[in-house]
Structure formats: structure tokens, C-alpha cells
Image (spheres, grey):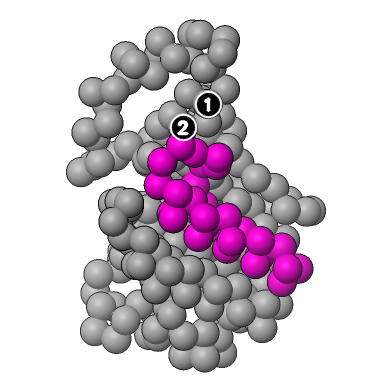
Amino acid sequence: MGANGRRRVFLTGGTGYLGSSLITALLTRGHRVRALVRPGSESRLPPGCEAVAGDALDAESYRGSVAPADAFVQLVGISKPSPWKAKQFREIDERSALAGIVAAKAANVPHFVYVSVAQPAPVMQAYVQVRAECEAAIDVAGLVATILRPWYVIGPGHRWPLVLKPAYALLEAIPSTRESAVRLGFVTLEQMVAAMVRAIESPPAQTKILETRQIRAATA
């Protein structure tokens, strides 16, 4: 950790939906951020973020560039997950997460931040299974982690589920469906970013899982 509590953060998926917003928030708060990008994509990172060229699916391509880091944030994944993307979940989401675990472990990073998915869930079984297996791999590696489990993150370009908000409100009001409705409810992009920033600035002593309710509380 640097002076004045500033964190050194290494991040994968920095040009994506969550990553770009998280990087901007961290830089605004004075933290140092380095992000893994494909060669030639450096300009897509927010200004002030240091680019590290490499392949997110191959730990060997960047493991030597991770340290020093107080936190490793794993955000690589298929955009707009759908049931028919099961093969891509294995080829991209799983491989990148396992590579990130290897790289973080090799660099002795004390805190691993991983965006998983709400579970159990009645749909998206392949997606849920891959994310659950990656959570297990983090545990096997002995990494102290913050694992966030949102179901759907509402934000720019990702607002269509808002039409379901009245139905969710009804289900949350019914005792028999309240727990699952909250677990599979929506969180906002701002809440996700706030929850990740809070985790990075105040890392847990042991692995901590943040469900939808805890993610929402990040900006309460």
C-alpha cells in the first residue's frame, strides 16, 4: 500500500462495462491502476491508467507485470451473457479467471477481487457453473478474496430489465419469494463500482462474499 492509504491495483477487463467505470473511480480517489490490455488497445483505457500488454487467457504473458499490487481485480468475461454462450463461458470467462488466479498467486497479491454471479439461479446454468468453479479455484489457490455476486447490473446500454421492476417489487413483498427475488434482483453500475472500491480500500482478512443486498448497500 502506498502513502496516504493509496492502493496499487492490477486489473483485467479494464476496457469493459465494469472495468472502465471502476478504473475512473479508483483514479479519482488517488489510487494507482494498471490494466491488462491486448496490444494495440492501450488507448481504450481511461486517461491516467497504466497499460500492461498481454493476453488475459495466458498467465505467462503478464504474470511478471502484476507486482507490486495490493489488489488484483478480475473482470474479463463475455458481454451480455446468454444461455447459448456456454462454450464461450468456458473459453473466455473460465480461462481468464484461472489465468488471473495463477498470475495473482505468483505475484503474492494479498487481495483478489472477482465478479461472480448470483447463485443458485433457475436459469443460465452454464454461466453460474463456470463462475462457481472459478470461486472454488480461488479458494483452492489460497487467495483472500472479495467475491461479488450480482445477477444483472443496470447501467448505460444495460437498462432493459427495468421493465421487470414492478414484478420484482411484488415478489420481494411476498415472504415465500422474497429471498430469491432479492438474490436475483438488480444492482446499479454505481453500486457495483462503489462495492468494489470499498473492498479494495478495506480488504477483508478472509474471503468475503457480497450478495445483491450487500452490493446495494455500498451506496446506501
Instruction: Using the image, determine if residue 170 lies above or below residue 94.
Output: above
Residue for point 40% across, 31% down = 186
Residue 23, image x, y percentages: 41, 59
Residue neighbourhood size for the residue with mark 2, other residues' Cα within 10 Å, grouped as few (<14), some (14–19), many (≥20): many
**Residue range (magenta):** 113-142
Residue 132 magenta-highlighted? yes
Taking depth in this image into account, of 188 and 200 the one nearest to the observer is: 188
Q: Which residue is disc 1 drawn over?
A: 180
Amino acid type at circle 2 is: Leu
In the image, 78: left or right of 33? left
Tell me the distance, in whole angstroms, between the alpha carbons under discs 1 and 2: 6 Å
Residue 205 magenta-highlighted? no
Image mark for residue 7: none
Residue 165, image x, y percentages: 32, 20
Instruction: Using the image, determine if residue 220 lies above or below residue 2.
Output: above
Quadrant of the rendering where the N terminus is positioned: bottom right
Residue for point 51% across, 8% down = 174
Taking depth in this image into account, of 10 and 180 the one nearest to the observer is: 180
Residue 142, image x, y percentages: 76, 68
Instruction: Using the image, determine if residue 179 lies above or below residue 10.
Output: above
Q: Which residue is disc 2 drawn over?
A: 184
Instruction: Determine contact: label 1, label 2, CB under 8 Å.
Output: yes
Residue for point 36% across, 61% down = 86
